[in-house]
Amino acid sequence: VWVLWILHHGVVKVCDAQEARRLLQDTDLAVKYPRAYKAFSYVYGSRFLGNGLETQLDHKKWEVRRKLFSHAFCRQHLYDLLGPFNDAWWTCLWITLVACHRIRRKLQ
């Protein structure tokens, strides 16, 4: 672990996996820097990351949003979605191949 100081701002670099895990899991240690998160929310005046889960600074609001997302990433739920995802992928691939074939015939 090392800290790079740029004027009065510190940037922490963590190279050990266990320390990085501890830092990311402990809410008291992982402090979000408000200026950086506000800068990433809207880049060049347009929405980039917005006010979503990644840029939420209020921990209570973050917990509510995180609970909404946690069901979506349940292992069984993801396995149930594999079939429809694969079917949609094959359909998209088929439509793309047919469109490419039609364009080739028009160009010839």
Image: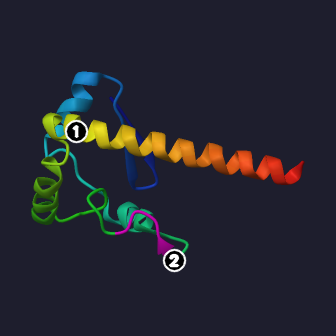
Q: Nearer the viewer, residue 57 or 52?
A: 52
The disc labelled 1 sits on which kind of residue?
Leu
Residue 60 spot, x, y in % from top left:
9, 63
Q: Residue furthest right?
A: 108
Counting residues from the N terminus, which is met first, the one under dot 2 or under dot 1?
Answer: 2
User: Chief secondary structure of the magenta span?
Assistant: loop
Residue 66 versus residue 24 in the image, above or below: below
Q: Is residue 52 left or right of residue 66?
A: right
What residue is shown with label 1? 78
What residue is shown with label 2? 45
Name the quadrant containing residue 21.
Answer: top left
- Quadrant, the N terminus: top left
Residue 66 versus residue 29 in the image, above or below: below
Residue 90 versus residue 53 in the image, above or below: above
47 part of magenta stretch: yes
The residue positioned 61% from the left and 47% from the top of the image is 96
Residue 72 spot, x, y in % from top left:
18, 48
Residue 38 spot, x, y in % from top left:
38, 68
Q: Nearer the viewer, residue 84 or 98?
A: 98
Q: Which residues are magenta?
A: 45-50
For discs 2 and 1, the disc positioned in front in the rendered view: 1
